[in-house]
């Protein structure tokens, strides 16, 4: 065999290396000549509204997309209750639902029918209940939008009457009909209502007890110039709402007629509103007027006004401020980490039989860091007997959720010395769980009976026990030592079991030991609900519920029918410490109407809870109609109407606080 000459291997390897190097250099050049240029980056996130329908859950009923959107809820309820030394049974049927029409707006129904041996004592069993049918967003020629109501409802009111800074005119409950017309283009609105007067009743199921009198209401609001609006409201009511001594409300005889006129001017920084009120109550004439004004100057906000309300002034069946004359001034500041306000009222009794003196308040809060804030508030009342109330607080957000430490102290001539220390903890839990815990200890003074030391422990929240079972509610344990001591446990718990698609079973347990008025609220113009020593009450409720949703949203220009859905749920509560977070020790606001997107209306239950199932994803509006809030509670503008975002197959939860004057 002939061998290659020496050095030929090196020559072959050298030539092979040059070929490989040339290929590596030429490859990128060729690729740059043939590859298309890279396009600009494009966001690939798909809007929730454009998502394709998701496959149904395994335990969901098959979707029914035939016809317009509509929903039905039917619930059979059985309850056994004890109140004081009496026991009674309630059983009945409740129904509700929504129906969206193409040409006649959106319809909402809320109805209860129950039989109870509590309603008329020893007279035997009797029937009770209520029914309300709403038609909202009915559009007519000329730019008019109409809302109609039939059944048990409250009288409407002009916007100028609802948006009051210092005084509040309530609406009247009735069994009848109402209509409200709005023309948003020129700011005109008008309403009328007529029906039979009465009061809400019922325990586990809401009802309405009609009185002997009638209620008639009418009003109009119009835009009268640049920045100016005026309104006129008329209300005639037969009867007065009074406490019956057993913890219930009753209707007493007596007629009243009243008229309210308001004119308001508003600019970007300033506003002023004039109010005149006249009434005839059981043949007695009375009149009143007040002026509220506000001005924003830089970081400062000024509120000031004057008022004069004759003795015996009335507005419908509910109590309002009367027999007072004076003025007030408030100054508020908010910038950076600081927020503070201060105010003073000078109040005189026209007849000489009421409050005569001054009332002053101050509040300050400093946000020390993104997690820690602290502050204090002080109330002073000077009259025949002086009194003061002091509150110190600190709140912190961290790994354990939101914590609030609070100390309250009140003292005054003839009132005794009261104090209370508390801690509220809202725990951060995973989706499907929520829990707030409150612990308090204090001493409440009573000028007649002496002081009482009380310890409280409260829980509020909800827990998903698997995919079909959930537990919601609140519990409060109280142990007192003293003349006015309360001992025992207050419960309002509900266990919900989804036994099948569209079917659910609920077991609720309720127990109340009564409540006491807080000694730390000193505002002489705050109209409190009558304080009564309520008897012990407890009940158990079993309910079987059927839910069904049908239909598909009708297509509109610029959008497609809604396919992906989520849920909206929340609660309405009385925010006693004014921090915007529902503490376990704070009470719920029941039987208050909540409206979704101006179309669909529901009422809060005994826990203050409300829910809207299967809501299209995207942005929605929640509005609270605060007609049935207990006095002196009200809703701030930011709470009464708010925007929420609904995500696919998730629950958008909203806790809405009601505030009281401070």
Image: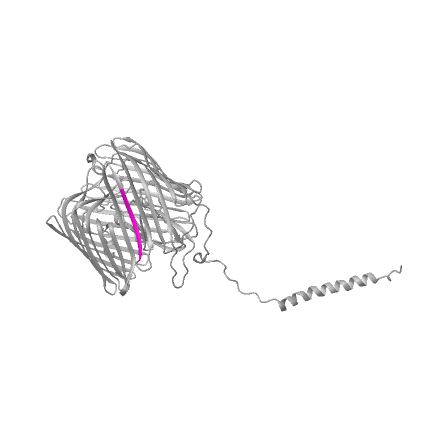
Nearer to the camera, 147 or 394: 147
Q: Is residue 476 above or below residue 346?
A: above
Q: Dividing the image into 4 quarters, which one contains the N terminus?
A: bottom right
- What is the chief secondary structure element of the magenta stretch? strand
* Magenta part of the chain: 105-113
Residue 139 in which image quadrant:
bottom left
Nearer to the camera, 490 or 367: 490
Across and down, in percent, residue 132 comes to: 27, 49
Across and down, in percent, residue 27 comes to: 67, 65
The colour scheme applied to this rendered structure is one colour
The residue sitting at 22% across, 32% down in the picture is 449
- Most distant residue in the left direction: 283
Q: Is residue 512 visible?
A: no
Across and down, in percent, residue 84 comes to: 25, 32
- Most distant residue in the right direction: 1
Q: Is residue 410 above or below residue 322?
A: above
Nearer to the camera, 297 or 182: 182
Left or right: 425, with 662 as reference point: right
Tell whether position 614 is magenta: no
The residue sitting at 21% across, 59% down in the picture is 220
Across and down, in percent, residue 553 comes to: 38, 57
Nearer to the camera, 269 or 659: 659
Q: Is residue 489 above or below residue 363?
A: above
Residue 117 in which image quadrant:
top left
């Amino acid at each position: 065999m002939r061998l290659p000459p020496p050095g030929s291997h090196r020559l072959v390897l050298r030539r092979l290396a040059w070929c490989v190097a040339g290929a590596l250099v030429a490859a990128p050049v060729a690729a740059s000549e043939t590859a298309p240029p890279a396009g600009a980056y494009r966001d690939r996130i798909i809007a929730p509204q454009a998502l394709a329908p998701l496959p149904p859950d395994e335990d969901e009923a098959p979707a029914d997309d035939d016809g317009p959107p509509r929903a039905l809820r039917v619930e059979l309820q059985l309850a056994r209750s004890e109140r004081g030394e009496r026991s009674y049974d309630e059983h009945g049927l409740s129904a509700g639902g929504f129906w969206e029409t193409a040409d006649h707006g959106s319809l909402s129904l809320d109805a209860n029918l129950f039989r109870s041996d509590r309603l008329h004592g020893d007279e035997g069993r009797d029937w009770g209940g209520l029914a309300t049918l709403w038609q909202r967003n009915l559009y007519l020629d000329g730019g008019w939008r109409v809302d109609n109501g039939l059944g048990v409802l409250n009288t409407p009111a002009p916007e100028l009457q609802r948006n009051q800074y210092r005084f509040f005119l309530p609406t009247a409950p009735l069994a009848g009909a109402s209509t409200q017309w709005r023309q948003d283009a020129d700011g005109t609105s008008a309403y009328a209502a007529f029906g039979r007067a009465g009061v809400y009743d019922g325990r586990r199921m809401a009802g309405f007890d009609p009185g002997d009198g009638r209620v008639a209401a009418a009003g109009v609001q119009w835009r009268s110039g640049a920045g100016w609006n005026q309104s006129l409201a008329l209300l005639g009511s037969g009867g007065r709402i009074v406490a019956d001594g057993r913890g219930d409300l009753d209707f007493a005889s007596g007629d009243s007629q009243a008229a309210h006129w308001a004119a308001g001017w508003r600019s970007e920084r300033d506003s002023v509103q004039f109010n005149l009120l006249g009434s005839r109550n059981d043949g007695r004439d009375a009149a009143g007027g007040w002026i509220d004004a506000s001005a924003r100057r830089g970081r400062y906000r000024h509120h000031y006004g004057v008022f004069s309300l004759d003795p015996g002034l009335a507005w419908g069946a509910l109590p309002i401020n009367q027999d007072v004359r004076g003025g007030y001034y408030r100054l508020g500041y908010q910038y950076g980490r600081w927020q503070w306000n201060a105010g003073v009222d000078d109040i005189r009794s026209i007849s000489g039989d009421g409050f005569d003196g001054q009332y002053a308040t101050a509040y300050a809060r400093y946000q020390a860091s993104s997690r820690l804030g602290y502050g204090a508030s002080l109330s002073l009342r000077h009259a025949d007997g002086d009194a003061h109330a002091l509150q110190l607080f600190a709140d912190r957000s961290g790994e354990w959720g939101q914590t609030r430490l609070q100390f309250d102290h009140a003292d005054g001539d003839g009132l005794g010395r009261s104090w209370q220390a508390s801690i509220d903890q809202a725990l951060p839990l995973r989706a499907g769980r929520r829990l707030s815990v409150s612990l308090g200890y204090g001493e409440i003074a009573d000028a007649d009976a002496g002081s009482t030391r009380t310890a409280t422990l409260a829980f509020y929240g909800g827990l998903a026990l698997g995919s079909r079972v959930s537990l919601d509610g609140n519990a409060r344990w109280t142990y007192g030592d003293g003349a006015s001591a309360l001992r025992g446990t207050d419960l309002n718990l509900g266990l919900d079991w989804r036994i099948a698609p569209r079917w659910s079973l609920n077991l609720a347990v309720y127990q109340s030991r009564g409540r006491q008025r807080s000694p730390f609220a000193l505002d002489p113009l705050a109209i409190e609900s009558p304080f009564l020593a309520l008897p012990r009450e407890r009940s158990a409720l079993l309910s079987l519920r059927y839910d069904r949703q049908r239909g598909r949203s009708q297509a509109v220009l610029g959008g497609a029918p809604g396919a992906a859905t989520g849920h909206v749920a929340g609660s309405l509560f009385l925010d006693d410490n004014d921090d915007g977070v529902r503490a376990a020790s704070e009470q719920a606001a029941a039987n208050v109407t909540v409206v979704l997107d101006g179309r669909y209306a529901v009422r809060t239950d005994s826990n203050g809870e409300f829910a809207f199932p299967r809501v299209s994803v995207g942005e929605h509006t929640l509005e609270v109609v605060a007609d049935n809030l207990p006095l002196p509670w009200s809703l701030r503008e930011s709470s009464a109407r708010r925007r929420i975002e609904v995500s696919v197959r998730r629950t958008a939860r909203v806790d809405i606080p009601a505030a009281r004057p401070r």
